[in-house]
Image: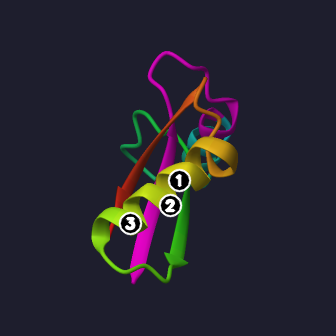
Amino acid sequence: MKARITVTLKSGVLDPQGKAIESALAALGVPGVASLRQGKVFDVEIAAADKDGARASLTTACEKLLANTVIENYAIEL
């Protein structure tokens, strides 16, 4: 089974890397970028009997390693 996990900073958490990318785009002449926040995407293939089992395993992976749940949110798509 294939899954995509998207990890993003929670709103209200400063994003200096996103701000740097936003500034770099403006310097490169890319118009109209008013706000940019960066994140991470993980494409995962997981062996699971069903979607519930896969989601449970991936939730454990996110909680223990892939996301810092103090400052980041994550979303799992199967």
Alpha carbon distance from label 1 to label 2: 43 Å
Mark nearest the camera among 1 and 2 is 2
Whether the magenta-drawn stretch holds residue 2 is answered as: yes
How many numbered marks have been drawn onto this rendered protein structure?
3
Q: Which range is magenta?
A: 1-19
Whether the magenta-drawn stretch holds residue 8 is answered as: yes
Q: Is residue 75 left or right of residue 21?
A: left
State yes or no: discs 3 and 2 in contact (Cβ < 8 Å).
yes
Q: Is residue 59 left or right of residue 67?
A: left
Q: Amino acid at mark 1?
A: Gly
Q: Nearer the viewer, residue 10 or 59?
A: 59
| Mark sitting earlier along the chain (1/3) | 1
Report the residue at 50% width, 59% height from top.
Answer: 58
State yes or no: discs 1 and 2 in contact (Cβ < 8 Å).
no
Question: In the displayed structure, would residue 43 be above or below residue 7?
Answer: below
Secondary element at tag 2: helix
List x then y, in percent, for residue 13: 57, 20
Mark nearest the camera among 1 and 3 is 3
Question: In the displayed structure, would residue 4 be above or below residue 73?
Answer: below
Identify the residue position indicated by label 3 in the image: 53
Quarter of the picture holding the C terminus? bottom left
Q: Residues within 10 Å of mark 2 (few under 14, many from 20)?
A: some
Label for residue 57? Answer: 2
- Residue 39 visible from this viewpoint: no
Q: Residue furthest top?
A: 12
Label for residue 29? Answer: 1
List x then y, in percent, for residue 17: 68, 38
